[in-house]
Amino acid sequence: MIDYIKGRTVELTPTDMVVECYGIGYRILISLQTYEGFNGKEDVTVYIHHYLREDEELYYGFSSKDERELFRLLIGVSGIGASTARMMLSSLTADEIRNAIIAEDINKIKSIKGIGLKSAQRLVLELKDKVIKGGGADTSLFQNTSNSMVEEAATALVMLGFTKPNVNKALTAVTKEKPGASVEELIKLALKKL
């Protein structure tokens, strides 16, 4: 299995690229995020997802391991194929996709071409816990803050009458701004955002 290809960019378009490595040109399908990450760079390291079926063999490439892991989470959801996952990563950034899943923002997910209501609901249902635990990312979403503290703050805010998606969105923002905050600080800072 190929983990990454390190070489020279020969061609680069918003949908695919050719990377030459030791005299072999690899055609790699990419997302718009990856295109923006590699635009203007000659020497690149492309993280590969090898897609192999009876009738086709494709390489999907990513500028970061983080984006590749999210891609793999997305294609693990029934009804989401590699092309749809690539479309999702071209429409929204990896962080926007994660935040939409955590906040259960069905409308944002549905705004992506090829994603209907049922697919959006399935994505949230199947991936929310994995994304919160850090799946599809190099590091956990709540990096230096204990998950139990975040959960405790979330429970308190829901009991105050705020909706779970809004609470999750506010706590995500707070934990990025102030990692390691206490439960009280999490609640106070989240209330300012709600």
Image (cartoon, helix red, strand yellow):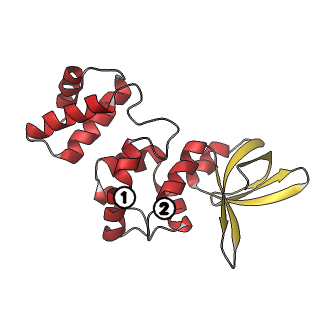
Which residue ends up furthest to the right in the rendered image? 23
Q: Is residue 106 left or right of residue 19?
A: left
Q: Kindly identify the residue that appears in the image at 40 percent across and 36 percent down.
A: 141
Q: Kindly identify the residue that appears in the image at 14 percent across and 34 percent down.
A: 156
Q: Earlier in the sequence, mark 2 or mark 1?
A: 2
Q: Nearer the viewer, residue 146 or 29?
A: 146
Q: Is residue 31 left or right of residue 193?
A: right
Q: Is residue 105 above or below residue 113?
A: above
Q: Are marks 2 and 1 in contact (CB under 8 Å)?
A: yes
Residue 101, image x, y percentages: 35, 51
Q: Is residue 55 above or below residue 84?
A: below
Whether residue 100 can be seen here: no
Residue 109, quarter of picture: bottom left
In the rendered image, which residue does mark 1 sit on? 126
Residue 72, image x, y percentages: 54, 56
Q: Kindly identify the residue that appears in the image at 32 percent across and 70 percent down.
A: 118
Q: Kindly identify the residue that appears in the image at 17 percent across and 30 percent down.
A: 191
Q: Which mark is residue 76?
A: 2
Judged from the image, the secondary structure of the residue bearing numbered disc 1 is helix
Q: Give amino acid for label 2.
A: Gly
Q: Give amino acid for label 1.
A: Glu
Residue 182, image x, y percentages: 26, 20
- Quarter containing the C terminus: top left
Residue 110, image x, y percentages: 35, 63
Q: Is residue 119 left or right of residue 188?
A: right
